Image (cartoon, coloured by chain):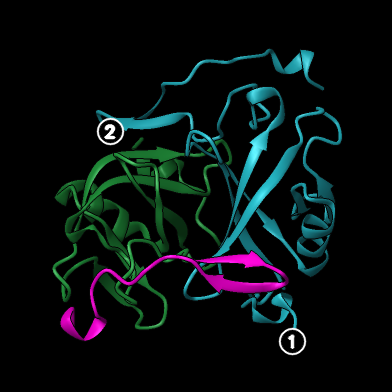
Chain colours: A green, B cyan
């Protein structure tokens, strides 16, 4: 019985994975994993996701260099969400050049951008 | 144009919502919202989810008293995940009586329980 068999995959064979900065607790992003992505994440000690849009494995940082080194993996009580506590190389996870993908806050009925761009995306990719 | 119209609902009309303790950064749980749940969350300033198993609105804490007071709502760059920064009444979010639903860590190929029960579930419900 492997840890893999405990996972409650959804109907597409995927599980959502939350990447959280291990030091600050900042939630960096949410992506998806299939069985192979999770196994590779554990084997390689870095975040490997399944890209739903590209339908392929996605080693986070393979283009940008902004890898996520895995420090801890947690599973919730329903077996259907995973947390990766990571060391985010380069200090930014979002393709917009921000630390976190969650850079908008609801204020006055609008999603307002509250976090700054750390690095111009055209200097990342 | 309402903030609601920016949400990229999935094929079931839902969006995953991460509840995070506003003080500590602890990720408490992940649940789902439909349009009505999100609107009620904003109106009532407390977490209201859509229970997929019971197919009904679920005001977190309606049975346990462990409400989640809403302090901030964030949306990710893909418009398909929400973070609720909350004040967790009672200091525990999980139906097992633990602070967080993510109380198991992968160690030696097994999901090992690492967080303690704060309150016996039979004293909660």
Provide the residue designation for mark 1.
Answer: B1
* Residue A123 included in the magenta stretch of the image: yes
Magenta residues, start to end: A104-125
* Chain to which mark 1 belongs: B
SS for dot 2: loop
Give coordinates of residue B97: x percent, y percent.
Answer: 65, 21
* Chain to which mark 2 belongs: B
Quadrant position of residue B114: top left
* Residue A52 included in the magenta stretch of the image: no
Give coordinates of residue A61: x percent, y percent.
Answer: 19, 67
In this view, B77 is above or below A25: below
Label 1 vs label 2: CA separation? 48 Å
Give coordinates of residue B11: x percent, y percent.
Answer: 66, 77
Provide the residue designation for mark 2.
Answer: B109
Q: Quadrant of the C terminus of chain A?
A: bottom left
Please report the residue visible at 61 percent of the width from the left and 14 percent of the height from the top.
B118
Judge from the rendering whether residue A106 lies leftward or rightward of residue A59; answer left or right.
right
């Amino acid at each position: 019985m492997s840890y893999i068999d405990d996972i409650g995959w959804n109907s597409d064979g995927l599980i959502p994975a939350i990447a959280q900065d291990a030091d600050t607790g900042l939630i960096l992003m949410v992506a998806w994993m299939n069985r192979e992505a999770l196994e590779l994440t554990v084997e390689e000690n870095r975040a490997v996701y399944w890209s739903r849009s590209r339908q392929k494995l996605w080693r986070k940082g393979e283009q940008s260099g902004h890898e996520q080194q895995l420090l801890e993996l947690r599973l919730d009580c329903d077996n259907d969400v995973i947390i990766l506590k990571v060391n985010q190389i380069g200090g930014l996870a979002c393709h917009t050049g921000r630390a976190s993908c969650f850079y908008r806050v609801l204020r006055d009925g609008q999603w307002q951008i509250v976090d700054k761009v750390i690095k111009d995306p055209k200097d990342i990719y």
